[in-house]
Image (cartoon, rainbow, N blue to C red):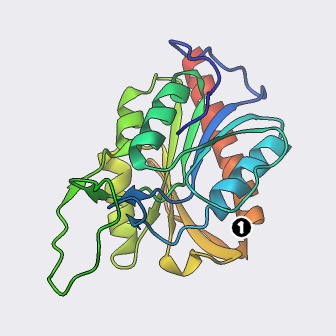
Amino acid sequence: MPTDVPPRRSKPARRRAGAPLRILITAGPTREYIDSVRYLSNDSSGAMGFALAAAAAARGHRVTLIHGPVSLAAARGVHAVSVISAAEMLAACRKAWPARDVLIMAAAVADYRPAMRLDSKRKKSSRDFVLKLRPTVDILADLSRRRQPTQRVIGFALEDRNARRNAESKLRRKNLDAIVLNSPAAIGRARSSVEILVCGGRWRSLPNAPKGQTARRLIRLAEELATVRARSQRT
């Protein structure tokens, strides 16, 4: 279950340019249990989300990292909140988001959950086992709908076909400020190549690099987006 996060505030205060940001980052997979021992999940290691949290903390920002089941340790200065399911991640994010300036949604949240969870382990048999699934709540879309005008939202898209088109559609549908596109080849790897699209801009490609280096570039992007927002609020 999620641990406590910093107290909720009804509305984030305006940020002056150059001031530390309050950044909410999600990372890793979620697990959606079928019975007491089996679950649906994915291969996300959480490495990019943890690298983002470390990069943000190193820049002096206040970081809350909400992550699924992973074998990684959060960097010093990062407030880490461990969750298991998509529902738990949603609840933790809803609690933390009102008092944050930026959301970076790097988690690989399960799109579906079993319609019914069995209380005990299901025994194997020779008969087919039909599993009915229901969609989970879209956490990124939910938080984007709830944001204040001063808050910025960066999403991730993992695509294996029609990559740019699908990512751009996600950017528009979920009202994001920017989206980071990567491929399944990045899962479990220490390095990755990503492409970035800022709302109203053009695609930019970051070369293949260690995830820590890519994370530092993305945190600078978050700073730029927040600074643009802060300036627009003053004019």
Q: Which residue lies furthest to the bottom in this view?
A: 126
Q: What residue type is labelled 1?
A: Lys
Q: Is residue 235 visible?
A: no
Residue 233 sits above or below residue 101 on the image: above
Q: Is 46 in front, or is 160? A: 46
Residue 29 sits above or below residue 145 on the image: below
Q: Where is residue 94 in the image (x, y as percent from the top left)?
A: 46, 30
Left or right: 115 as drawn, with respect to 72: left
Q: Quadrant location of the C terminus?
A: top right
Question: Label 1: how many residues lie within 10 Å, few (<14), some (14-19) or many (20+)?
Answer: many
**Residue at horizontal 58%, vertical 21%?**
99
Q: Position of residue 82 (x, y in %)?
A: 60, 45
Mark 1 sits on what residue?
A: 211
Residue 92 sits above or below residue 155 on the image: above
**Residue at horizontal 61%, vertical 17%?**
7
Q: Is 39 in front, or is 25? A: 39
